Image (tube, grey):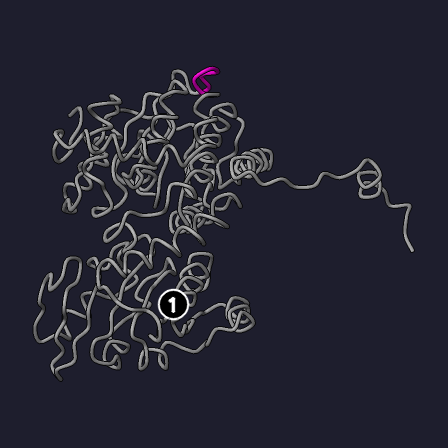
Amino acid sequence: MKADVTDRKLAPEGKRRILWADADMPVLQLVRERFAKDKPLKGIRMGCCLHVTAETANLMRTLQAGGADVALCASNPLSTQDDVAASLVKDFGIPVFARKGENVATFYKHLNAVLDRRPNLTMDDGADLVNLLHTKRTAEARNIIASLEETTTGVIRLRAMAQHGILKFPVIAVNDAATKHLFDNRYGTGQSTIDGVIRATDMLLAGKRVVVVGFGMCGRGVAARARGLGAQVTITEVSPLRALEAVMEGYDVRPMADACRSGDLFVTVTGNKHVLRDEHFRRMKDGAVVCNSGHFDVEIDIPALRKLARKVHRQVRRNVDEFQMRDGRRIYLLAEGRLVNLAAAEGHPASVMDMSFATQALASSYARKQNGRLQVGVHGVPREIEDWVAELKLKAMDVRIDRLSPEQQRYLASSSEGT
């Protein structure tokens, strides 16, 4: 199978979308120019499992410019932009296996199609390729130089694998890079999640009670954007430190057992399972809206919600399902519990993905150069990559910063000066 996309006739619109995004990704453009000259990935077969969006398309173009033989599949059944997938195949010659709305069987067929190309460097958003290489395709794991992981949920899975001694090759946790999670997770997820909610529901957030489940970087971003639109924001957390930070940021913090009674909108961003479940649904008020912006669709216990419902009305509005409870209450689920920012909107803006994907591309070059020298485990992105990306982003934004004077450099390097 050379490629599997919904409709190649969509390619012209997809190309326009890709080039529009590229115009707002100046750092990745510079990386692409450098890659085209140096060819750091020449001879490498790369298997990528990412959200198939215009921003991802520009990352694929960059890897291709670096000499890599690239193949791409979707990391979520609802996140694919079909026109972008078509353009990558038709205009850029990159094999893509992704269809928006694909079922689970097709999703895994596409994962396997990428692995059938025998990659020696993988790039994941959720660790699905890595998981297959550790379960059903273990014999091929020995061919992997390294893998790169893009998202919090994937890093959680990979650290667990490393802790249990079952990880078979090195992984670079791109998600943990400051140029990724401090910006992409916070500003990208914050804006795109609220965008998805508004597109799906046309909800006025001003005056609403928004419950953000989890106060990691993604939760911080969602909470800030909701508050900026006039919402009253409640945070639920299991981490004392994060809960304390939320309190000191001025948010209402309480357990979900209390928060579930008053919320108008619930957004899950934890990377964990069933953070909204049976006992919460039973207490929610009529008209409550629930959605997820974590990677997997397990944060909301949808089977429990379905079991509680007397009737389910599918697609009462695009990306909105109505669950009618036996007592007459209605609970609305957005985007089938999948990533609302990608399923109901367009995902993160190109400007913030510029940093994430520049870091991702440079980390792939680093992994190739380290072939055989990285120990099996989960590794961070080198600081010099992060500094380079941050400096280029500031330059693109026409922002200047100070430099240390020679005296200041000597002072910081010395222990002899004091009071």
Could you tell me which residue is drawn at 17 percent across and 43 percent down?
100
Which residue type does callout 1 highlight? Val
Above or below, 91 relative to 240: above
Identify whether 132 is placed above or below 225. Answer: above
Q: Quadrant of the C terminus?
A: bottom right
**The N terminus appears in which quarter of the rendering?**
top left
Q: Which residue is mark 1?
A: 212
Q: Residue 154 in the image: state x and y as whole percent.
A: 38, 47
Q: Secondary structure at mark 1?
A: strand
Q: In the image shown, does 415 or 400 lie closer to the viewer?
A: 400
Residue 256 in magenta stretch? no
Q: Nearer the viewer, residue 413 or 203?
A: 203
Above or below — where is 418 with respect to 226? above
362 vs 213, left or right, is right
Q: State which region is magenta.
A: 35-40
Residue furthest to the bottom: 327
- Residue 385: image quadrant is top right
Whether residue 38 appears in magenta in the rendering, the answer is yes
From the viewer's perspective, is 233 left or right of 388?
left
- Structural crowding at the residue carrying mark 1, measured as other residues with C-alpha within 10 Å and reported as few (<14), some (14–19) or many (≥20): many
Does 29 appear above or below 104? above
- Give coordinates of residue 359: x percent, y percent: 48, 36
161 or 81: nearer the viewer: 81
Residue positioned 27% across, 78% down in the render: 279
* Number of numbered discs on residues: 1
Image coordinates for residue 93, horizontal then vertical, percent: 24, 21
- Residue at the front extreme? 398
| Figure quadrant of residue 238 | bottom left
Determine the residue positioned at 21% across, 31% down.
113
